[in-house]
Amino acid sequence: MPVRADYDFGRRYRNAFSAFPGETTQHVVVRFDARIRPYITETTWHHSRKMTPQPDGGIRFEVDVAEPREVMWWSFCWGAGADILAPEWLREAAREEIGRMAENYSVSSVEPIPPVGSD
């Protein structure tokens, strides 16, 4: 299928953090601890990023993105070294998702894996 002559990929995805485009943006703030800071500062994660060093060695990371949940999902890869600060609805969504993730790993929901060669 040919691409329309007026299609501009860069314009369509300029507000995407990763995959989800959009015309409007929301401001997202994530605090990373000192252990994670080098990985955050060495890469341009998004063109709108603003990073502010924190007194304890961590970093405050701010972006304006079309789909804030992308930043939430990305922040999960940094584990407890990341803390979503804003917007509040995204912080609450992260709290709920982490709760569901914790249920996946609860002792009662994990079936024991039989030892190798036991079948």
Image: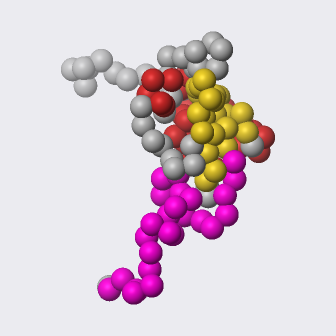
- In the image, the segment drawn in magenta is 2-27
Q: Which residue is drawn at 57% across and 43% down?
A: 49
| Count of residue discs | 0
Residue 109 visible in the snapshot? no
Q: In this view, does 104 lie to the left or right of 88?
A: left
Residue extending furthest left? 117
Is 59 covered by the magenta stretch?
Answer: no
Residue extending furthest top? 56
Q: Residue 100, position in %: x, y?
A: 63, 36
Q: In this view, does 45 lie to the left or right of 60?
A: left
Nearer to us in this view, 96 or 91: 91
Nearer to us in this view, 98 or 74: 74
Quarter of the view holding residue 109: top right
Is 49 situated above or below 118? below
Q: In this view, does 24 lie to the left or right of 21?
A: right
Is 65 situated above or below 53? below
Nearer to us in this view, 106 or 2: 2
Is 6 covered by the magenta stretch?
Answer: yes
Q: Which residue is drawn at 42% across and 31% down?
A: 42
